[in-house]
Image (cartoon, rainbow, N blue to C red):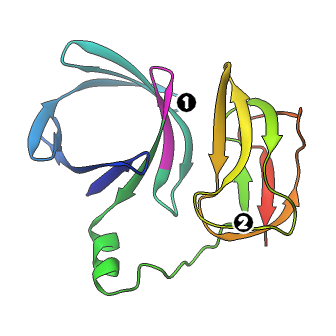
Amino acid sequence: MNVKVNDRYNFDVELAPKGLKVDGAELEIDSAELGGGHTHVIYQNKSYNIELVSEDKAEKRSVVKVNGTLYEVAIEDQYDLLLKQLGLDNIKANKMKEIKAPMPGLVLNVVVQEGQEVNKGDNLLVLEAMKMENIIKSPDSGIVKKILITKGDKVEKNEVLIQFS
């Protein structure tokens, strides 16, 4: 399967007997599931704390936090590649309906307005979490139907922030 990180880095990833095979090289990884979306990994004598912040199973996209840094991860399996080859990759069964808070935080700025058309990757809002500013981007194209938050609001994880029509 193809794994894309932050829409920039591509890796060919397979399951291997002792861990993972990334771009043809087998990696030995020692990991322990801690529950609640948390995992501890040791790789090349270095420790990594990994947290699943948000997951969109339909789009095969996740946001993970590794040692405090957020990464957006997208997975493309053999079925996605086949759909691309057949020219059917633009057909969406589920349109974007809403944006939820990937983590608890403070809304610093709302960039869009109700009725505005947005494209995939457009900035929607700025959310401060753990003293870091996180720009929440649109995962797909659509029209903003309702904005449920305003600048200065405190939000909880998975709280609906913006709805689309």
Residue 54 screen position, x and y as percent: 57, 43
Please give the range of residues in magenta. Answer: 62-70
Q: Nearer the viewer, residue 16 or 2?
A: 2
Q: Crowdedness of circle 2 by 10 Å Cα count: few (<14), some, many (20+)? A: some
Identify the residue shown where x is 79% and y is 73%.
165
Q: Amino acid at mark 2?
A: Lys
The residue where tag 1 is placed is 36
Identify the residue shown where x is 10% and y is 37%.
26
Q: Quadrant of residue 31?
A: top left
Please state if 43 lies on the left or on the right of 102 as rendered: left
Where is 121 relative to 159, above or below?
below
Where is 102 relative to 139, above or below?
above
- The dominant secondary structure in magenta is strand
The residue where tag 2 is placed is 97
Q: Is residue 18 visible?
A: no
Q: Quadrant of the N terminus?
A: bottom left
